Amino acid sequence: MPINITQTAQRLISAKESRQPLESLIDHSAGPTVADAFRVQQEIIRLNVEAGDSISGFKLGNIAKAMQSKFGVDEPDYGYLLASQFYPENLPISAADFIEPFIELEPGFVLKKDLGGKHVTAADVMAATDFVVPALEIIDSRIKDWKIGLFDTLADNGSVGGVILGGQPRKLSEVNLANQPGCIEFDGQEVARGNTNAIHGNPVSAIAWLCRRIAEYGITLKAGQFILPGSCLAAEKMVPGTSITGRFEGWGEISFDYTPESSSVTHS
């Protein structure tokens, strides 16, 4: 029996809005495909844009082996970034916005020209990049207990929950993304450490991979969009009442307080 794209998309939207995760998304014996999952994702984005949101960029996830091991997914996922998913740094973020969130550290790319096609190379990515910034990504599955496969996380828009940008933009020539150490701290204590070389050897190459992959769906990344290439470390589960900081050595950091539901205004 074919997957009902519209119904599956609506179930994921409802789970996000109610913060009541789904026990399971689909019957996997029905033989769902990656293309089906991406159609669900595109329907979710269409409905969000129709409701007044806008597309701000794109993300690649689970490209690092540490992330694949963490969530038991053996292929990368990818999804759109919406304007509503961006949070200011140094301001509280409420647990009321999420179900079971984890935090990741990655370099974010802002494009100065369009980038796409089935033959994109690392050189094309470098030529199209305006600047890079330190970024934290909150991932949050709408599937209960993160019991996900590739179909689930793709349909769920790459499990994206939120994005926080640091205010330290750099040109690609000013950072060495082939060897950029970084860490995440909870209340000043390091809880995770990694290096950008875990992101497909270099995040630039990861974005080239993403462009080639989504070219199969006719998608091109656009000038001005913000692109996340994937986490450089294993995501850490967020704990309400914690001050969270992501830091790239010699480059910059991003911080926010993750507050219990009752003590902060919900993001909208």
Image (tube, helix red, strand yellow):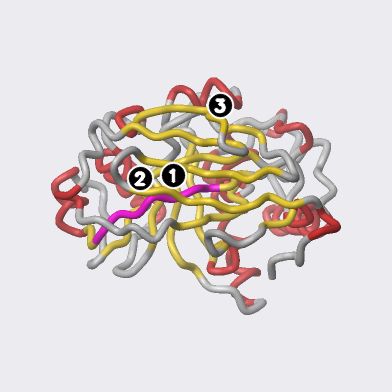
Give the main secondary structure, helix, strand or loop, of the magenta stretch: strand
**Magenta residues (range):** 131-137
Q: Amino acid at mark 3?
A: Val
Q: Are marks 1 and 2 in contact (CB under 8 Å)?
A: yes
Q: Secondary structure at mark 3?
A: loop
The local crowd at label 1, few if under 14, some if 14 to 19, many if 20 or more residues have their Cα within 10 Å, is: many
Precedes in sequence: disc 3 or disc 1: 1
Q: Position of residue 68 (x, y in %)?
A: 51, 25
Who's the residue at 26% across and 48% down the image? Answer: 118
Whether residue 192 sits left or right of residue 124 in the image: it is right
Q: Amino acid at mark 2?
A: Leu
Question: Horizontal and vertical percent for residue 105?
Answer: 46, 41
Magenta residue check for 240: no
- Which quadrant of the figure contains the N terminus? top right
Residue under pointer 3: 73
10 Å crowding of disc 3: few (<14), some (14-19), many (20+): some
Q: Secondary structure at mark 1?
A: strand
What amino acid type is highlighted by mark number 1?
Leu
- Taking 85 as reference, is 123 left or right? left
The answer to whether 101 is drawn above or below residue 163 in the figure is: above
Q: Residue at x 59, y 22 (%)?
A: 72
Depicted 112 relative to depicted 238: above or below: below
Q: Say which of 23 and 227 sits in front.
A: 227
Q: What label sits on residue 60 in the rendered view?
A: 1
The residue tagged 2 is 210
Taking depth in this image into account, of 29 and 133 the one nearest to the observer is 133
Confirm whether the magenta stretch covers residue 136: yes
Q: Which mark is residue 204?
A: none
Visible in this render: residue 224?
yes
Secondary structure under the numbered disc 2 in the rendered image: helix
